Amino acid sequence: MIRTIAILTGGGDCPGLNAVIRAVVRSAVLERGWRVIGIEDGFDGLVGEPRWRELTLESVRGILPRGGTILGTSNRGNPLAYPVEENGVTRLVDLSKAVIDNFKRLGIDALIAVGGDGTLKIARALQERGLPMVGVPKTIDNDLRGTDVTFGYNTAVGIVTEALDRLHTTAESHHRVMVLEVMGRDAGWIALESGLAGSADVILIPEIPFDLEAVCAAIQQRKARGSRFSIVVAAEGAFPAEGRKVLQVSASENLGVERLGGVGAFVADEIARRMRVETRVVVLGHVQRGGTPSPFDRILGSRFGVKAVELIEQGRFGRMVSLQGRQVCDVDIVDAVDSLNRVEPDGDLVRSAEALGIMLGRSKPL
């Protein structure tokens, strides 16, 4: 018998998280009379002394249009490999048993974990250790398998598209090459779709290592046709065919996690050096994560929250809610996190972009 459920939001924040929280609370309380607990700051809230709050109808009133998450989040709180400092040395410790003990101590019957690839892998491991769990996919990168789209992505694409619209006017006025660096560690969905929507001239994504000579040739061809400016969109995980991804911090310096950033500046510098043209770089960074969620993400987040509560009621743990076509359904979380959803280098979106004359960083399409 389900009486109390908990929800946490892990990984990077994104628009639509509060829509999920609100939907979980309203459907659990109004339709089932359950109690809902919100775990603060992702899985960090279950490490050590639990940090949580009661979630009532009153506490979720008015949060639907708000960005971020009222529960807070963390993209470093992995209880399976938790950083603990002893004698000035940081080592990674498995605290999963302590997390499950806190779960039982709070009287929670099931957990809804809202997050991306990292959060859901943690949730899957805890499920295997006996913690009843349902997953909700969230990432602006749209790189989770098992669902056609994740909430937060639609808003991020809209923000980047608006930025491109604004960059066009200043690039044209000053006859510059403008390079816009956007998020996309392993998957180039944001760069590709916003580049299509925002009429970019060059789009660089992780799935297609780019040829700088081909990029410069494409810009030169535009110049020969009378265009005195160009717009380049580069996903942070894009890299040259003869090189590696551009890092801010290496994995060895950051507890095993690379921090990307700088590919925009690298591309702009190379274009300026090779072509002797004026370039500028804009890095949107966390602007893509913030602000009001789009109507699509509010609705999708709400539908996902309702479905997660239904799965708990049915005792179908170890599942992840999913959008397939227009239908919200569910998939085995194992299948959802075993590999990433990446852009097909010869898929429909890439072919459409190249047919429109957009350079994808390669000299010849596959």
Image (tube, helix red, strand yellow):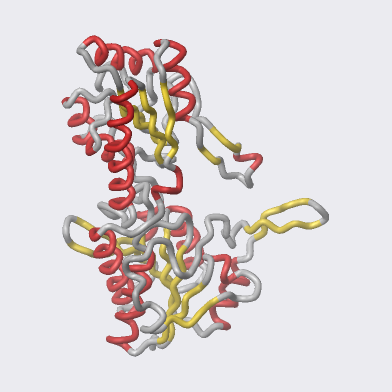
Q: Residue furthest front?
A: 173
Judged from this view, the residue extending furthest toward the right is 87
Q: Position of residue 168 (x, y in %)?
A: 28, 31
Query: Where does the N terminus fall, quadrant-wise?
Result: bottom left
Left or right relative to 60: residue 221: left
Residue 2: x percent and y percent?
A: 39, 86
Q: In the picture provided, is 248 more to the left or to the right than 152?
A: right
Picture mark count: 0
Q: Quadrant of the C terminus?
A: top left
Q: Position of residue 267 (x, y in %)?
A: 44, 23
Nearest to the observer: residue 319 or residue 207: 207
* Residue for point 35% across, 15% down: 216
Q: Is residue 333 above or below residue 238?
A: below
Q: Is residue 236 above or below residue 74?
A: above
**What residue is drawn where x is 31% and y is 55%?**
150
**Residue 295 falls in which quadrant of the image?**
bottom left
Residue 346 percent across, percent down from the top left: 24, 30
At 30% from the left and 12% from the top, the residue drawn is 220
Q: Which image quadrant is residue 313 in? A: bottom left
The part of the image, by quadrant, that contains residue 92 is bottom right
Residue drawn 21% across the image and 36% down it: 349
Q: Nearer the viewer, residue 45 or 118?
A: 45
